């Protein structure tokens, strides 16, 4: 799932780094750290949008509000393991389907999680040591984890078919 805001930020930062010959400088580090924060913010927003899409057919506003508040309360990180745990709350078959997809695409999952871990370093530690090009590569190959999440959550699950 390519994200417009992330793609635009990558383009603008890449142009700046190239035009100013700032690769390998502190400016690259700062732009990379900003990019990591934007990526994670967009990941979180996309996950919430997919959950909203999942329960869009529910007409009772109070139930929709309840689901939204529960997601905010239980979902603290966008790492693939936490996404798996969130899917499990909808039913174990969702978690299992996500696990199968991620096992088939371990490199994408690793790159996706690298974004989250490095963003965590920016927010809570000494920053990040990855380059702008590393961050872009992680995104280019890792964003499909969000596609897996969407595909799995919006699909029919075995437990739904039994109901």
Image (spheres, rainbow, N blue to C red):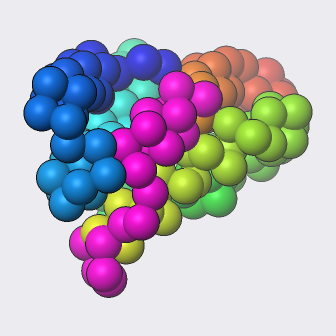
Label tally: 0
Q: Nearer the viewer, residue 1 or 137?
A: 137
| Coordinates of residue 150 in the picture (x, y in percent) | 55, 25
Q: Quadrant of residue 119?
A: bottom left
| Coordinates of residue 140 in the picture (x, y in percent) | 52, 26
**15 left or right, relative to 156:** left
What residue is rendered at 24% in x and 20% in y?
A: 11
What residue is rendered at 55% in x and 55% in y?
A: 114
Q: Is residue 159 above or below residue 32?
A: above
| Coordinates of residue 151 in the picture (x, y in percent) | 63, 20
Quadrant containing the C terminus in the rendered view: top right
Q: Is residue 31 above or below residue 10?
A: below
Q: Quadrant of residue 26?
A: bottom left
Q: Is residue 1 above or below residue 39?
A: above
**57 left or right, relative to 144:** left
Query: Which region of the structure is painted magenta?
Result: 123-141
Is residue 35 located in the magenta-colored stretch of the structure? no
Q: Main secondary structure of the magenta part?
A: helix
Most distant residue in the bottom direction: 125
**1 left or right, relative to 5:** right
Q: Nearer the viewer, residue 41 or 58?
A: 41
Is residue 136 located in the magenta-colored stretch of the structure? yes
Q: Is residue 68 shown to the viewer in this render?
A: no
Q: Quadrant of residue 97?
A: top right
Q: Is residue 117 shown to the viewer in this render?
A: yes
What residue is rendered at 68% in x and 37% in y?
A: 108
């Amino acid at each position: 799932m390519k994200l417009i805001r992330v793609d635009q930020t990558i383009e603008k930062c890449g142009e700046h780094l190239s035009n100013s010959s700032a690769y390998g400088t502190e400016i690259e580090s700062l732009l990379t750290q900003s990019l990591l924060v934007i990526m994670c913010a967009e990941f979180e927003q996309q996950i919430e949008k997919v959950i909203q899409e999942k329960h869009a057919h529910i007409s009772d506003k109070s139930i929709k509000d309840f689901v939204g508040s529960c997601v905010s309360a239980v979902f603290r990180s966008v790492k693939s393991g936490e996404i798996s745990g969130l899917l499990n709350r909808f039913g174990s078959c969702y978690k299992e389907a996500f696990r199968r997809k991620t096992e088939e695409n371990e490199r994408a999952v690793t790159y996706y999680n690298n974004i989250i871990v490095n963003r965590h370093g920016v927010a809570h530690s000494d920053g990040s040591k990855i380059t702008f090009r590393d961050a872009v590569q992680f995104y280019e190959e890792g964003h499909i984890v969000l596609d897996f999440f969407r595909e799995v959550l919006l699909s029919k699950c075995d437990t739904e078919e039994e109901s």
